[in-house]
């Protein structure tokens, strides 16, 4: 009798545990193949044209790419949970499982590939400079010598220019790219440097239309990839979605919609796995 009572009690506990697990499993489909209630995607919240949170929602090229990929994985737009992915937090967010994938101007590098996997690349960007539209003095990177060159505090972009291309450039560090843009507009600085895609996103804003231009210097290659947790089967699925996005014309439409006003001379869509050094 005692044995039957213990067995029955254990069975009841096991049944409750299974039921609880089943109830929780519908909240999120970790395989990213649809069927769950949501998929969690990391993006930038503060980069116009790339990834930006606005009162109207989320916008930018990375957002458009993420929406397309999510749909191919079986998720509608209202099933996407957006999470801010700051540059310093991206690997940790993926390793902890805070997000399913990250699309956030995320350059593929050997150091990062040791910690996470990447699908893509889906965009080849380059370090460049943004200057005033009427500036005819800066035509090459060497022309930045003795010019006031701005980037955000902690960024390596401006230091790269000074170390390799314009040793006499006067580096100015501002807290945000928006602050650099204001300084550029007010002639407090002469040029702003970071990835050309990011610069094009800022220059495409309505309030800046026609006021700035890209130098077109292509000082580095930045291969933007979609980050996933190491070993995730999402990598192959996302790669297939990216190929579809290019082949059906959605990639070109997204580039034009987000960067067109800045006359951004984008590179053609890269081949999956083709990482330019």
Image: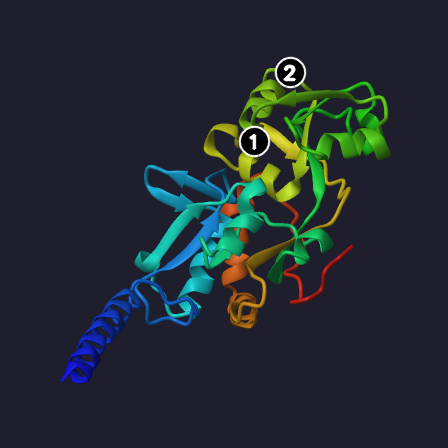
Q: Where residue 184 sits: x, y (%)?
A: 62, 21
Looking at the rendered structure, the number of numbered marks drawn on it comes to 2
110 vs 256, left or right, is: right
Q: Which corner quadrant of the image does residue 242 belong to?
A: bottom right
106 is higher (above) or lower (below) than 3:
above
Q: Judging from the image, what secondary structure is the residue with disc 1 in?
A: loop
Q: Where residue 214 sits: x, y (%)?
A: 67, 36
- Furthest residue in direction front, as rendered: 2
Q: CA distance from mark 2 to mark 1?
A: 16 Å
Q: Which residue is under mark 1?
A: 210
Q: Where residue 196 sits: x, y (%)?
A: 65, 41
151 vs 201, left or right, is: right
Q: Judging from the image, what secondary structure is the residue with disc 2 in?
A: loop
Q: Is residue 94 visible?
A: yes
Q: Which residue is under mark 2?
A: 187
Q: Earlier in the sequence, mark 2 or mark 1?
A: 2
């Amino acid at each position: 009798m005692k044995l039957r009572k213990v067995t029955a009690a254990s069975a009841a506990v096991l049944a409750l545990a299974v039921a609880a697990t089943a109830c929780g499993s519908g909240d999120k489909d970790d395989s990213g193949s649809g069927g769950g209630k949501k998929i969690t995607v990391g993006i930038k919240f503060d980069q116009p044209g790339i990834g930006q949170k606005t009162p109207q929602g989320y916008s930018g090229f990375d957002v458009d790419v993420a929406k397309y990929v999510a749909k191919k994985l079986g998720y509608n737009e209202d099933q996407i949970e957006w999470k801010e992915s700051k540059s310093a937090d991206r690997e940790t967010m993926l390793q902890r499982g805070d997000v399913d994938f990250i699309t956030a101007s995320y350059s593929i590098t050997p150091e990062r590939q040791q910690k996470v996997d990447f699908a893509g690349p889906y965009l080849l960007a380059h370090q460049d400079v943004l200057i005033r539209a009427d500036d005819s003095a800066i035509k090459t990177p060497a022309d930045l010598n003795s010019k006031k060159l701005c980037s955000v505090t902690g960024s390596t972009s401006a230091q790269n220019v000074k170390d390799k291309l314009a040793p006499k450039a006067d580096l100015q560090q501002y807290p945000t790219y928006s602050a650099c843009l204001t300084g550029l507009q007010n002639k407090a600085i002469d040029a702003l440097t970071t990835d050309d895609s990011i610069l094009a996103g800022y220059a495409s804003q309505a309030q800046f239309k026609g006021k700035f231009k890209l130098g077109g210097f292509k000082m580095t290659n930045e291969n933007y990839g979609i980050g996933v947790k190491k070993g995730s089967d999402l990598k192959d699925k996302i790669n297939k979605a990216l190929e579809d996005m290019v082949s059906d014309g959605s990639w070109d439409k997204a580039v034009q919609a987000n960067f067109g006003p800045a006359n951004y001379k984008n590179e053609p869509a890269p081949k999956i796995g083709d990482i330019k050094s």
